[in-house]
Amino acid sequence: MDLDDLVGTITPNMRTLLICVAERRPPAGDELATAAGLGERRAIQGVPIEAVVTSWHRAEREVFSWLATVDAPMTADEHRQSSRDLAAAVDAMISASTEAYRRARTEVAGHLEQIATDLVSRLTGAERLDPQVIEERARLVGVAVQAEHRALAVHGSHLLPRAQRLVLDALRPILPSRTVAGARDDVAVIVTPEVPGLIAALNRVVRRDEMVIGVGLPRPRFGEVAGSCREAMAALSAGRHAGRLGVVEFGTVVADVLLLENPLDARQVVQSALGPLLGRPHLVETLRAYLHSGLSTRITATELRLHENTVAYRLKQITDALEADAPAALVRADILMALRYQELDQP
């Protein structure tokens, strides 16, 4: 407790209790406003409301004890009346304090929520960010900025707020400090401390509810997490393009992200690697199945419901068209990237 707190809130409220007991009346007007001011101040300071109520009851006991030691002793009836008057005054002051406390907490929570939403908007935007400025704002909402953080991008079949809440509820038991959450278009973005068990907790959520969660790589401090936000959004986009549900970690879809973010280059790769086959979709289908099977003619024939001789004939057509010496020579980075982009580019 500092001097301003003592002079501005504690002393006037104690004086009010004594006056109300002496005049046998409840507090009113400015007296209740002072009690409300105490509740508001404690809300801003982050003091629990239970502690505010407890402090009033402690004040009640102090005044009651003082009344018992005054120079002019009171009769038993006077003592009982003073006790009733004091209790009524304290109840009125508590009511004023707690109502003001709740109003202030609601306003503070709304303000902090707006700061958090603004942070997410800035972290997911294209604007160049100053890490120090980002961390200063993050401290206002209680983020442990010196800890490792990473971003999550959530899209589900639920309405956006519910999908976000499902993820936050799953993570809350394992998180040591505050998360920051907001939205970008139809995607919920959550910046969370990096903790053991994070991916496992996310996997449990997606097993219960149909959603895709893109996960960015961790960053050593909160001020550097904008890169993780971009990665999470990109991983989510790649997962949705591939028709995946579940957790999509950026590190597992980097190639897909490169293709999706550079469509002109990707289409050029398709034309260059598969050009002679593009007019013959059955050969592209066979090539994809053959590479996916680990270069097994038998597995390819089973998957496509063809005779092995038909598969062998098609592979001869493919190798001739692509000028490959043998079917094994079809395992080329450009061919694999071209086939993958065709899968991702499906409407």
Image (tube, rainbow, N blue to C red):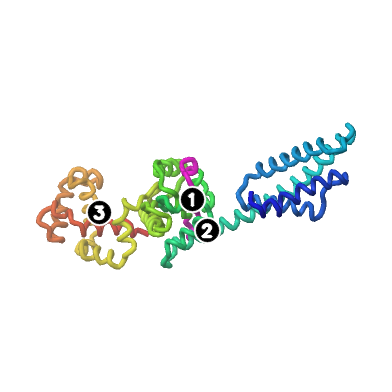
Q: Amino acid at mark 1?
A: Thr
Q: Which secondary structure lies at badge 2?
A: helix
**Magenta-span inclusion, residue 340:** no
Q: Going by the image, does 29 lie left or right of 194? A: right
Q: Quadrant of residue 336?
A: bottom left
Question: Residue 284 placed where, x, y %?
Answer: 23, 56
In this picture, which residue range is highlighted in magenta?
Answer: 170-187
How much space separates mark 3 and mark 1, taking CA atoms? 46 Å
Who comes first in sequence, dot 3 or dot 1? 1
Q: Amino acid at mark 2?
A: Thr
Which residue is disc 1 drawn over? 179
Which quadrant is the C terminus positioned in?
bottom left
Q: Which secondary structure lies at badge 1?
A: loop
Q: Amino acid at mark 3?
A: Glu
Residue 294: numbered disc: none
Q: Residue at x 66, y 53 (%)?
A: 3
Residue 285: numbered disc: 3
Q: Residue at x 35, y 58 (%)?
A: 346
Which residue is disc 2 drawn over? 117
Residue extending furthest toward the front: 71
Crowd around label 3: few <14 · some 14–19 · many ≥20 (10 Å) = few
Q: Residue at x 24, y 62 (%)?
A: 278
Question: Residue 132 placed where, x, y %?
Answer: 44, 61
Question: Residue 205 placed where, x, y %?
Answer: 45, 43
Can residue 100 be seen in this snapshot?
no
Camera-nearest residue between 116 and 234: 116
Label 3 close to label 1 by CB (< 8 Å): no
